[in-house]
Image (spheres, rainbow, N blue to C red):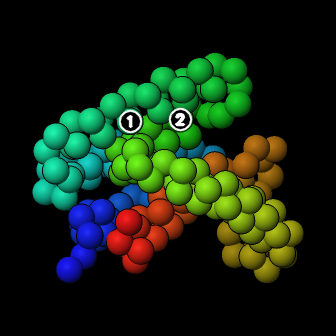
Amino acid sequence: MLAAAAREALWFLPFVAPVAIWVAWSDMKFMKIPNKAVLALAGVFATIGLLAVPLPEYGWRWMHLAVVLAIGFVLTIAGAMGAGDAKFAAAMAPFVALGDARLFIGIFAASLLAAFAAHRLMRAVPAFRAATPDWASWTHAKFPMGLALSGALLIHLGAVAMLGR
């Protein structure tokens, strides 16, 4: 029998994956994370969370969104991250149980390094650039953080589903 967290992650993955892929693509192509994607992710938690997360914890998980949103806005004002990144990170927060915060931080750190390296490598490959000539992230000074955030969320849910944490 699967642990509760693994069942929860399995409930979320099919609904989260398309939104995460959309965010990664949009951030690389336009250097923007659409508000519709942020709302879609929050909507997944609002609906699927009712089925997947025990009710008392479901309410507390919304606090994760509020806390991460507040921190994200401070970082946005300080110029450390974009507003879209802050809003998407906040929408991701309810999908991470408080007990898995350290696991998620480690996954995010690895995802950030891997996404940065992969993005910089791919933009240096002429064939890849030719296949995606209109992607704003190839010439933009900033990194499309939605790529790393999306990857971290998907890896985290996948790991929880497999490990049964």
- Secondary structure of the residue carrying tag 1 is helix
At x 19%, y 58%, the residue is 52
Residue 46 lies left or right of residue 118; in this view the side is left
Which residue is nearer to you in this view: 60 or 32? 60
Residue 7 lies left or right of residue 145; in this view the side is left
Which residue bears the numbered disc 2? Answer: 86
Measured as percent of width and height from the top left, residue 161 is found at: 36, 72
Which residue is nearer to you in this view: 61 or 117? 61
- Secondary structure of the residue carrying tag 2 is helix
Identify the image quadrant of residue 117: bottom right
At x 46%, y 70%, the residue is 159
Which amino acid is tagged 1? His
Measured as percent of width and height from the top left, residue 119 is found at: 74, 64
> Can you see residue 123?
no
Residue 79: which disc? none
Where is 50 relative to 52, above or below?
above
Residue 164 lies left or right of residue 44; in this view the side is right
Number of on-image labels:
2
**Quadrant containing the N terminus in the rendered view:** bottom left
Q: Earlier in the sequence, mark 1 or mark 2?
A: 1
Where is 7 relative to 30, above or below?
below
Identify the image quadrant of residue 17: bottom left
Label 1: few (<14), some (14–19) or many (≥20) C-alpha neighbours in 10 Å = many
> Can you see residue 94?
yes
- Depth-wise, is mark 1 or mark 2 nearer the camera? 1
Label 2: few (<14), some (14–19) or many (≥20) C-alpha neighbours in 10 Å = many
Where is 151 relative to 144, above or below?
below
Measured as percent of width and height from the top left, residue 86 is found at: 53, 35
Which residue bears the numbered disc 1? Answer: 64
